[in-house]
Image: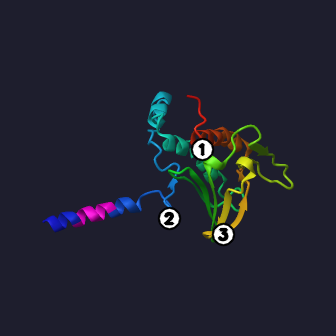
Amino acid sequence: MMKKMMFTLAIAAGLIACNSDTNENGLEKVDANAAAVPANASPTEQIKAMALEEGDIIGRTKQSFIPLQEEYRKASGKVPGVGEVNVFVDDQFTFMIENKANGHVYQTKVNLKDLESEQGGLSLIPDDGQTIKFPGLKLNTKGGKKAVQHLTDGKVVKEESYLEIFLADRPGIERVTPAILQGINIANDKMPK
């Protein structure tokens, strides 16, 4: 009887692990723990369902990147080279954008604590329709440190001192910019007390 119970528990644990929204590096998708909000919920009920404890720094940081994940889903198929994109943040504030496209896995990885959120740390990239087809934003690293890694199929191919994000349209960039800055500020303990 005890063996059957242990076997059943082992299978249940395996199923739970298989359904987890983490990648092979242990990074968790930013929307993996998003609260389920009923479609007919009032605005107040929606806010309550999404609320996190003020002391949950990791949870608040991850929640800040949910709009970026949603905008990448909208950009898939519209922006060349954007396939199935997932955004991850781990407990050490490592931020990663993973793009599965054209038979490859492209990853851009940086620790949020290395990104500059002060004056001059962010700039918008306008789409001119000729050389730059889609709008974007550029986030510089603190002190120009080459802290942004670009990987292709798990191998580092380039390191840069800035992170660029391109989306399908300007409203998408306008939506994610304050959320990204909020996530960087939370990770750097710069939110007003």
> Residue 153's image quarter?
bottom right
Q: Which percent across, then down, holds residue 126?
A: 81, 46
- Determine which of the numbered discs, if any, sits on residue 67 in the image: 1
Say whether residue 190 is magenta: no
Nearer to me, 154 or 147: 147
Residue assigned mark 2: 24
Residue 5 appears left or right of 106: left
Give the mark nearer the N terminus: 3 vs 2.
2
Give the mark nearer the N terminus: 1 vs 3.
1
Crowd tier of the residue under label 1, counting other residues whose Cα lies within 10 Å: few below 14, some 14–19, many 20 or above:
many
- The residue lying at 32 percent from left, 61 percent from top is 13
Q: Quarter of the image containing the N terminus?
A: bottom left
Amino acid found under the numbered disc labelled 2: Glu
Q: Which percent across, then down, holds residue 20?
A: 43, 57
Mark 2 and mark 1 in contact? Answer it, CB < 8 Å: no
Q: CA distance from mark 1 to mark 3?
A: 25 Å
Callout 3: helix, strand or loop?
Answer: loop
Residue 80 in view: no
Amino acid found under the numbered disc labelled 1: Pro
Give the mark nearer the N terminus: 2 vs 1.
2
Callout 1: helix, strand or loop?
Answer: helix
Residue assigned mark 3: 102
Crowd tier of the residue under label 3, counting other residues whose Cα lies within 10 Å: few below 14, some 14–19, many 20 or above:
few
- The residue lying at 56 percent from left, 50 percent from top is 93
Residue 90 appears left or right of 109: left
Say whether residue 12 is magenta: yes
Extent of the magenta region: 7-13
Crowd tier of the residue under label 2, counting other residues whose Cα lies within 10 Å: few below 14, some 14–19, many 20 or above:
few
